[in-house]
Image: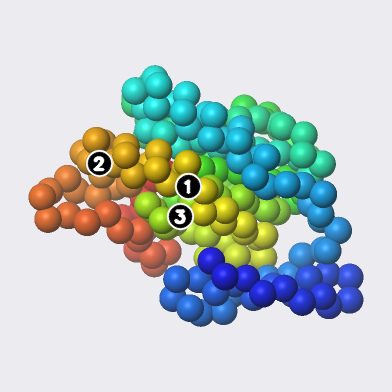
Amino acid sequence: MHMSVTLQHDGLSVVVLGKRRQARHMTFRADAWSDIDPTLLLGTARRQAQRGLDEGGIPIGAALFAGDGTLLGEGRNRRVQHDDPSVHGETDAFRAAGRQRDYGSTIMVTTLAPCWYCSGLIRQFGIGAVVIGENRTFSGGEEWLAELGVRVTILDDALCTSMMTEFIAAHPSLWHEDIGVADTPTSTPTSPTPSDPIRSANS
């Protein structure tokens, strides 16, 4: 993702160029999360992803942080461990964080681009920022979130990418199950559009 930033009064005007090379505009306050290093936050989500892999699950981890960097909750995809397709990394971290009165200053950190299910959670509760480890192996609702004004940061992290790439190569059937794609020799994992809810994918 390519991003150009210009100051405008008390906020930032940001243009995000996604894979379709279309401009996505969003505005947020210049002082929000200004002292937070997203690469440090990603470490927590990455450790959760590794833990999930060690348990025999899908290596996707996430964490929810307060605006000052305080960890509120962390979790991982536990579809396999809990036999529950609703336990995505982001939903697990969200539940672990417990009740919050306001999510506007919180930061959702995830090793993989959030699917439409998890993107909906971010939208529903007004989470203000999302940090994504990588979106090469899967592209979800990140552009949609940016359009809605969520601050989206994609780190293109090599460790996150290699972890998912190796997992997909070793467990294609489980990966296809997780993202909602029929496991056939000719099937290619794709990310559904918001207008195609029947084929919604999981991260």
As rendered, which of 159 and 121 lies closer to the eye? Answer: 159
Element at label 2: helix
Q: Label 1: few (<14), some or many (≥20) within 10 Å?
A: few
Camera-nearest label, 2 or 1: 1
Element at label 1: helix
Residue at point 43% right, 26% down?
Answer: 52
Residue at point 51% right, 43% down?
Answer: 111
Q: Amino acid at mark 1?
A: Ala
Residue 93 lies, with reference to residue 30, above or below; the image says above
Q: Which residue is mark 1?
A: 158
The answer to which of marks 2 and 3 sits earlier in the sequence is 3
Q: Position of residue 94 (x, y in %)?
A: 61, 35
88 on left or right of 165: right
Residue 144 lies, with reference to residue 90, above or below; the image says below
Q: Which residue is mark 2?
A: 169
Element at label 3: loop
